[in-house]
Image: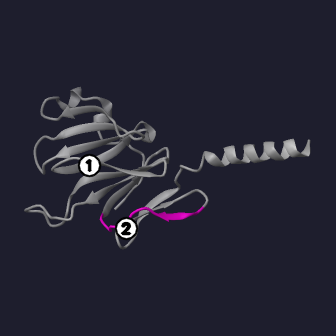
Amino acid sequence: MKKFISIALVIFTSNCHSGNINKFESIYIDTAKNIHIIFPDGRDKKITKNGRAARATLAPDKHSAAWLVLNSWIAEGDVGPSSSQLAIYRNSRLRYIKCEPFIRDYWFWMGGKQVAIDCGGRHFAGTLILYDANTLQNIDSIFQADVPEDKRPAWSRQEGNSDSNTVQ
């Protein structure tokens, strides 16, 4: 009987802990422009080593983190590098969404289950693309010039869509 109770206690404890294993407490960019994620147990895990991170964001559900990966080049007329890549860290995996020429903005949608990007040149219309945060599959996309703002789906309006915190 004691053995059964011990096994049941171990299973119960590990199931309780597993809910937090892929959940984050916070995210920050260090002085070398690398990403760190803080876990609920206080662990500080350095995710990147290339020093090119900007605008790090933790999803509202705290299961995903995202940041822009700065280009190693500077576009003509710009004062600093922009980004053509969005890094997504989820389920202990680091993956990337790429879009040329620039990812102008990004935001989480559906509490963090989805992520949207605004991709295009510096000026004029671009493309809004919605991805599943877990699989990075393209769910929907809109070319801004083809769809008036008042006719676009709710996910495409980044203003106020995400209650996540962004760090520069």
Residue in the foreground of this view, choosing between 90 and 152:
90
Q: Residue 114 sits in which quadrant?
A: top left
Q: Which residue is mark 1?
A: 105
Tell me the magenta residue range. Answer: 42-52
| Nearest to viewer (mark 1 / mark 2) | 2
**Image position of 44 with respect to 59: above or below:** below
Q: Secondary structure at mark 1?
A: strand
Residue 2 position in % (x across, y down): 90, 45
Q: Residue 11 sits in which quadrant?
A: top right
Type of amino acid under label 1:
Asp
Residue 33 horizontal side relative to residue 12, left or right: left
Q: Which mark is residue 76?
A: none
**Residue at the spot 37% in from the left edge and 67% down from the top edge:** 49
Type of amino acid under label 2:
Lys
| Residue at the extreme top of the image, as rendered | 151
Quote the CA–CA distance across marks 1 and 2.
23 Å
Residue 125 horizontal side relative to residue 70, left or right: left
Residue in the foreground of this view, choosing between 18 and 39:
18
Labels 1 and 2: the sequence-earlier one = 2
Q: Residues within 10 Å of mark 1 (few under 14, many from 20)?
A: some
Q: Which residue is mark 2?
A: 49
Residue 101 horizontal side relative to residue 139, left or right: left
